Amino acid sequence: MKIGKSEISWGQTQYILLWIALPLIIGVLIAAAIPRPIIGVIHLDTAIDSYAAGDLIAQIDYARQRTEVRAVVLMVDSPGGTVVDTESIYQELLQLRQDKPVVASVAGMAASGAYYLSVGTDYIIANPTSEVGNIGVIGTLPDNPAIFESLVSTGPYKLWGEPRDTFQREMEMIKQDFYQAVKLGRGDRLLVGPEVILTGRIWPGSEALRIGLIDSLGSQSVAIATAARLARISNYRVTDLAGLIGIQASSSGFFAQSPDGVTLPYPNQTGIYLLYIPPVPVER
Amino acid sequence: MGFIKRYRIWIVLALLIVPVALRGLSFYHGYVIRPKVLSPDFASNAIPEPPISTSAPEQITLRTGKVVIMDFLHSNQIAPSDMSSFVTALTQRGARVEITNGDLPLATQLKYASAYLVFSPSTSFSAEEVNLVRNFVTSGGRLMVFTDPTRGMSTYDYNSGLTINQPDADSANNLLAPFGISINNDYLYNLVKSEGNFRNVLFSTFGSSTLTGDLTQVAFYGVHSVDAGSGMPLIIGDKNTYSSLTDSDGSGMAAAAVSADGNVLVFGDFSFMIPPYNTVADNGNLIRHIADYALGGTHTHSVADFPYVFDRNVYVVPAGGMQMTADMLAPLASLQNELLATSTSLAIQAEPPAEGDLLVVGSLTPSDDLIPYIESFHLGLDDPSTIVIPSLGTVSRSGIGLLLYHYTATRNTLILLTDTLDDLPALIDLVSSGDLSSCVTQGDIGVCSIGSGNSYYAEPTWEPPLEGTPSSTPSG
């Protein structure tokens, strides 16, 4: 009799299924729809030119659009590049940062334009011997205006772009823009003034930390953990955004090549650059 | 069942929410409030403009006849066109600019130069050149050395693959060593306030000098620092002007200096002379002051500088009523040609004119009209066979010619004396050759060997007196 009393009838079973199992299943299904957060990784391991800028901006745009991308780590190993492309990426990074934390992780080098991009992130991490800084602008002065017998233009600077002197002053203006970006990006964390950082020096990561150019020393995994902390997420997935959106590594031939095919550290075109060029061997 | 029935709504809600909450909390630990992200105000940054030129119309003091020698024999890293504004300032003052191209020895050019300019030398000066320049400066000539850290010569060593720099400061210091001023192999920069670039340094502190007296601010475009040594710093950097050698406070670091005697001027830059930088701030005024300085020296000549001992037209004055003979006229004609080559004319004048330089000729037995010219030399002429020369001692009269040189601001006088008038043509001939290698020269006095005294001209013949001149000539 006891056994018979404890038996659950079909009606009761239906009742339990309706009011317990079904809601649970629905709850689990709804929970499953909650996306696992992603920390998007964007790699900058070339010189910054129009190709690199296009790739990076596409990834930044993807990260901004996709809600599951909760933070971005910019893996930097670059000597910098062109001014206009650096500025384009920088502006996009600022847009992204308004919504999501961005952390820069300097593997080998964040020099010049690459450091410009780094100060557009929330947090900069570098290895102790990473090369960081080189804040400044370089350029080769254009020739003095001249005229030619068979090449005719409609103004003195149609062929030359601008006077040599103006070119140099324009570089100074770009340097001020760069410095302003560093000041804004680093804020109170920057521990030295323009007389130090505008020397254009390139510092090892440990020294860069001491003067406030970066926030901490660490590897890429530390950068990812920092991004997760800033985004307040865990159990995240780390995804290379370039692979996610199908970007193939592209090469623009930014650097000049010697006649025997060796890639040189100089750009193949004259112009104004936010670029670190290693010193040539000189015997004084 | 009763429990379930009673709380079924809450149970349903819990069963719906709990999985969602569990999964959500396993991923997200709170709402992220993003900080305000500021963007640089790019629009507020403008291309920096140079300081406005302050050059005003100037009063030019003409210094006609002055010659400035510009060195081009030491692989100088400068094009003549770079110096157009400076050369214009010199020529506006009546000066002439010559370059050292090897046609004339430096020793010769320095004889008549007011200033010797060296721009960015890439090869060293020889000991002989250094000595020549030192003597030039000692005699009141002005040495002006300009260097530029952007102008050093670079060569590529194909063996080592290295680029070898030959900084102009090294070569310039070789020349400047005797004067106690040196140029550092560096460049100055200012990261706080500059003229369009950190290496373009603005200077507002000046030493007390006519070169800088009315300057407020000058801009140099890549400049070595100059160690004034015993001299005076002329253009001085502020506390934010650093040297590339030390990257530290360069207060008092000079970009230009002048030697203690005022005859050596050294600049660590010359780009400020080159358009368009020659019109920035007070640069134009500085260039004019430098031009005045180049022509403002008092280069005193000595006998050894002949034929460049005259600054004006020369008049031959025969002393003691000496008559012009054919033997005299021939060497005088040669001398006239020699002086013409130095743009100096020569004429014979019985009496000294009010203006012009003089070539006085006579014998060692002085006449009354000769004495005023030679008394300042304190010669001992009492013994008929010897002369006592204060700096040289006693010299035999026979076979020698004496050159005495007297320099004043208004007149230069060269006196040629021989024992007898018979020997005078030989001395004039020797002098007109321009080769004084057979003469011992000491400051304002030269003693020349002209042969064997009275026998140099075997048979001296005397012409009748020239018309209008005194009839007799005292013989030795």
Image (cartoon, rainbow, N blue to C red):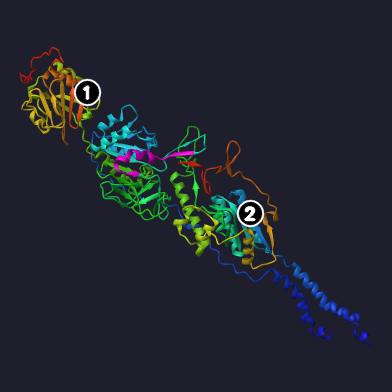
User: Gap in Å between the C-alphas at discs 2 and 1?
Assistant: 85 Å
Side of B434 relative to A37 (left or right): left
Say the numbered circle drawn on residue A43.
Answer: 2
Tell me where residue B184 appears, x and y as whole percent: 37, 45
Q: Secondary structure at mark 1?
A: loop
- From this viewpoint, is residue B114 visible? no
Side of B100 relative to A194 (left or right): left
Mark 1 — residue? B438
- Please report, as a chain letter, where disc 1 is located: B
Instruction: Return the residue found at the far front.
Output: B394
Q: Which residues are magenta?
A: B163-182
Of the pair A69 and B183, the residue shown nearer to us:
B183
Residue type beneath disc 1 = Ser
Q: Secondary structure at mark 2?
A: strand
The prevailing secondary structure element of the residues shown in magenta is helix
Q: Residue at x 75, y 73 (%)?
A: B19
